[in-house]
Image (spheres, rainbow, N blue to C red):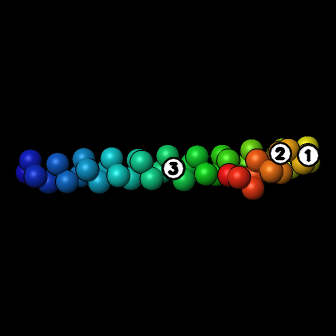
């Protein structure tokens, strides 16, 4: 039983890490689309670097 809980804990940690990464990417896309109307040469260069 302990091994089963250990594996479930590892899986939940792995899932949480990837969920936070996906959430971060979604927030970046939403933030970029909101700021898209204020694009200047400097900010477009920053987007290309990202």
**Tag on residue 21?**
3
Q: Which residue in the protein does label 2 denote? A: 43
Q: Position of residue 49 (x, y in %)?
A: 71, 52
Please give the name of the residue rendered at 83% of the width and 51% of the height, measured from the top-left corner.
44
Q: Nearer the viewer, residue 48 or 11?
A: 48
Could you tell me how far apart the alpha carbons at marks 3 and 2 are, in whole angstroms? 23 Å
| Local crowd size for mark 3, using a 10 Å CA cut-off: few (<14), some (14–19), many (≥20) | few
Mark 1 lies on a secondary structure that is loop
Q: Nearer the viewer, residue 49 or 38?
A: 49
Q: Which residue is mark 1?
A: 40
Residue at image coords 42%, 48%: 17
Q: Residues within 10 Å of mark 2 (few under 14, many from 20)?
A: few
Q: Around disc 1, counting alpha carbons within 10 Å, would you say few (fewer than 14), some (14 to 19), or many (20 or more)?
A: few
Residue 2, can we see it? yes
Circle nearer the N terminus (3, 2):
3
**For the residue labelled by badge 3, is the local secondary structure a helix, a strand or a loop?**
helix
* Image spot of residue 46 (x, y percent): 76, 47
Q: Are marks 3 and 2 in contact (CB under 8 Å)?
A: no
Question: In the image, which is nearer the foreground, mark 3 or mark 2?
Answer: 2
């Amino acid at each position: 039983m302990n091994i089963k809980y250990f594996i479930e804990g590892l899986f939940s940690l792995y899932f949480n890490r990837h969920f936070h990464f996906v959430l971060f990417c979604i927030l970046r896309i939403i933030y970029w689309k909101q700021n898209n109307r204020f694009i200047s040469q400097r900010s477009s260069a920053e987007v290309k670097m990202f």
